[in-house]
Image: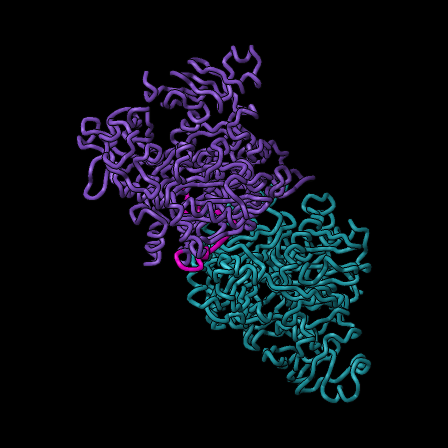
Chain colours: A purple, B cyan
Amino acid sequence: MTPHQEIKVTFQPSGRHVHVLPGTRILEAAARAGIMLRNPCGGTGVCGKCRVRIERGKCPPTAACSTVFGAAELALGWRLACQCAAEGEAVVDVPAESLFESAAQILITDSGAKVHGTPALHKVYLELTPPDLAHPLADLERVAAAVGVAEMPLAQLALLPDQLRAGGFRGTAVVCAGQLLDWEAGDTSGDAYAVAFDLGTTTLVGTLINTADGSERGVAATMNPQISVGDDVISRIAAARESRHNTLRMQESVVQAFNGLIEQLCREAKVPRERVYEVSVAGNTTMQHLFCAINPAALGEIPFVPAYRSARRVAARDVGLQIHPAGRLFVFPNIGGFVGGDTVAGVLANGVQLSTETLLFVDIGTNGEIVLMHKGHLRAASCAAGPAFEGARIAAGMRAAEGAVDKVVFDGTDLVCNVIGGRRMAGICGTALIDAAAVLLDLGVLDPTGRLLSAEEVPASVPTAVRQRLHPDGNDIKVMLGAAAESRSGEPVYLLQRDLRELQLASGAIRAAITLLLRQAGLEPQDLDAVLLAGGFGNFIRRENACRMGLLPAVPVQRIRFVGNASSMGAKAVLLAHELRAEADRVAQVTEHVDLSLDPEFQMEFAMAMMFPEGA
Amino acid sequence: MTPHQEIKVTFQPSGRHVHVLPGTRILEAAARAGIMLRNPCGGTGVCGKCRVRIERGKCPPTAACSTVFGAAELALGWRLACQCAAEGEAVVDVPAESLFESAAQILITDSGAKVHGTPALHKVYLELTPPDLAHPLADLERVAAAVGVAEMPLAQLALLPDQLRAGGFRGTAVVCAGQLLDWEAGDTSGDAYAVAFDLGTTTLVGTLINTADGSERGVAATMNPQISVGDDVISRIAAARESRHNTLRMQESVVQAFNGLIEQLCREAKVPRERVYEVSVAGNTTMQHLFCAINPAALGEIPFVPAYRSARRVAARDVGLQIHPAGRLFVFPNIGGFVGGDTVAGVLANGVQLSTETLLFVDIGTNGEIVLMHKGHLRAASCAAGPAFEGARIAAGMRAAEGAVDKVVFDGTDLVCNVIGGRRMAGICGTALIDAAAVLLDLGVLDPTGRLLSAEEVPASVPTAVRQRLHPDGNDIKVMLGAAAESRSGEPVYLLQRDLRELQLASGAIRAAITLLLRQAGLEPQDLDAVLLAGGFGNFIRRENACRMGLLPAVPVQRIRFVGNASSMGAKAVLLAHELRAEADRVAQVTEHVDLSLDPEFQMEFAMAMMFPEGA
């Protein structure tokens, strides 16, 4: 088995599996399978929170494992996921306490502290004493006395007297965020569903949660249908500026997509749609505006002012969501015009706002959002990274789907590409771009200005196999990643010079933003206790390579932590812990919004950040 | 001019006029014209709050006037309205400070204390600093910082960014009950309209108010269209019990009638309908339930439990009211199944809940509601008086409209009937029934059991003219009030024996309820400091006669105060003083609801109360 042949790692009890290169740490493999393990120490093997048990397969313990586990435990297969790597196909048992989220509690700070929150939605089965002459209390007040909530939408109150009497005053009160939403026959207290939405410019992700036990009942994703209007927020804003009709059309299309996801989630989990009582939505400021049918035009003009900052707490039907007729909707607060609810959600999900460490939170997407926490002060900035990381504007670019090259390594003699699904090559996704840049930089094939050298120009140390991949392309050079025979289309797959320019732009924007935020706080990269890397994409980046090619600041790689889809996690968190809603508003209010586009230093910093770092 | 020929009294500055008998006190004449004057002393001439100026006409001062006014003032025409009577046609100037309500403040306690309330609805013209790079605050937060309210319905928030920019950040914020309802171009702060509704079983009365200055801009009334289902609440409840469809139909019909009244009020006052931002509604428990589309079936069954007690604060569009799209609705709280929001409104409007006096509040309608305030404790009861006071179930009965006999007096030789409008007689209304009973009792034509005596049986003192009105009617006697020649139909108008039986039932129910409430508090009628007589009907009763025939307890007549349409006044009060809304909830909560229908003493008391009191 060559080092670049993937092995299958299966996680129990979920049964999810993933194909990774041998030597991939279990923590990373789990993350790729969508299983976030606790790693408050940043994967340094110190805290022992990421313990897993190797059920089958070879996975030797490290020294750190031996300090945490006794010989008997080691013999049973207990390992630290952050330290150990599977050397072949493996089955890994993940105990619930090692999960980033466990059922009824949310691990909220990255230092391991827990917030024991209460869901905004909860149901209570009640056997009320029917009214009699001595106690002729009104129906609503009778239920309210039992659940402590006296507000009820009129349409539901209208049905309450009949419902109470039909069930002999026995039934389930549905309570959500200070309102009594309904009275249901029998005991339905175990079915308290809510959906958390990550409202991305490109992708919509919905997670069905049962707030009764905190369990996740399904995840579904679809493209943001607004993509037909344009790839990025600027194009959506431009369309909205044209006419109110466009705004309404974009609003309806997203709501329709959400309704489709809700329908799918409910069908797959066998949950009646009317048993979904709440929805939370986290997206960037523009996406959230459009979702609420608010014209985002002002977000496209100096001084980039949003219509609202504080969270929206409204009836779900007000935007057209098809859940329980009295269902509620929570839309995250915005920090500013380009730092929105998704960032607030990510901050909350990782307890950044509570940290005493100096933390950098980086969410890489079409827009990059960066939050710096230092000595209790939160600063946030955004930058337009563009869609390069998502494969757009790259000649052979594609999303991280089957057929995409998602990883490029140098095995000592040649470049080795991993193709998702293991079949023929269809294109390149963002992580492979970063890998390729880092590998080519190390080899000296790519110079710090971002120029690809020809086979003749490269250092003598570059092996022949690599040299043979460097083909002329007009005045430029292109790198053949896959030959015609390996390719799905029958044409070779190339990495072009201009692809690397796109990467430089995307990476430079994010790096410049990080540099400026650090500078404003008087910090250097090495002052960072941790870098939290969020976003579906960030989660697949190889940290060494991201540092090597300059996307991330030069910090010891173990300080870089993957935190998954933090926006989605924050959207789930506010469903499970209503206390975090006020906290979200507080974060949005106290975070200093740094508008980099207006910083005279930004252009200079951007230009400099586009240069790849010199090798070590 | 004979004593029973009416004179015209005109009130300035409103220009309203009324026809009354000479000798009618100005206070009473004003009340009949819908102008409520302050009379905290109960019309005893002590407090001097009801001062008016006689512009034209003969109205001699009394001794009480001379103690309050100097000679110069008396010469200018200043009089106490509670003491003086016009002897002929008169024009009376009413200063604002003598009005029961004056513009921005509501006289809330009958002891003269004022509550300086703030309207729930108010508008603020703002010239905001447009956002710039240094102050990129979100639009909503920018307005919120100026008005102190941060909640805004999503549909209005969606339009806010465009509205703010279209007007250069100058415009009017519309604030109602803690919500920002809209942003309007220009300065519209003077147009802050709201409508107060008295939702009666029989009649709907709407009052258009400009909360910007507290002015009343119009009053309009119509029949409750639910009358087609039945006269009283019991018939409405029965219909609702039949089907949900019936409940919804009754709901829609009342909302449609309200919308018609709003349309009419707006048209007459030249106010755009979208400038009406709030509606308050006070009605009995059943009417309020139907208005909210709540099945009132439980109100028709022991233990007569309402669906809700506390006030409803919802969007006006939730019930279908056509005002501003974000307009609000306040529905009064209920005390119990048969003591509803109209009673709470009446209590509030008269500050009964704050009084240190022992007060009896009596609202006479199809249902009689009675509230006793004694030593800080509120007790309330209701009784089914039936529609006799409104002219129903009376052979020649009719409402107090043109052609109705509204007053019966004995002028020493004969009965004299006053006919509304002064033309031919069409029938008899409730006040005349009470007058007739009192006069006939005094003459000895009616005995305490309620039996009419024949011309042969009556005492010798009864003049011939009266005797000639007593005609046989089978085994009974009937009283001819108008001969064929005086009657509109050409047939004589009679008061029948069974009409008096109906009156005994109606009066007896109310009197029995009063007696029981007093007894529960350990009180006798003479312990009452005041009896507040509410309701459109109560306002026209002649107090002496009401006491004489036993409807009201035997208290000195000056302790009986007319308080007008107290339900309507309470509905207006909560629009002008939002502070009274929490007070309304408090009153509904602390008032002890006494269910007389279940009191074993009630039937006995009712039977006794049906007997007319012996003469003095």
Question: Could you tell whether B282 is left or right of A227 in the image?
Answer: right
- A120 lies above or below A94: below
Residue A190 in view of the camera: no
Can you name the residue that lies furthest to the front here? A460
Which percent across, then down, holds residue A390? 33, 39
Decide which of B337, A442 is in the foreground and name it: A442
Query: Residue B279 at what x, y percent from top left?
Result: 54, 60
Relative depth, front residue between B269 and B254: B269
Can you tell which quarter of the image residue A529 is in? Answer: top right
A452 w.r.t. B278: above or below: above
The stretch of residues the image draws in magenta is A300-322
The answer to which quarter of the image holds residue A49 is: top right
> Residue sitting at 59 percent across and 57 percent down?
B282
Q: Position of residue A585 (x, y in %)?
A: 55, 47
Q: Is residue A307 magenta?
A: yes
Number of numbered discs: 0
Q: Is residue B300 magenta?
A: no
Q: Main secondary structure of the magenta part?
A: loop
Asked if residue A409 lies left or right of residue B132, the reply is left
Image quadrant occupied by the N terminus of chain B = bottom right
| Quadrant in the picture for the C terminus of chain B | bottom right
Q: Nearer the viewer, residue B309 or A491?
A: A491
Q: Position of residue A498 (x, y in %)?
A: 27, 43
Residue B194 visible in this rendered orientation of the protein: yes
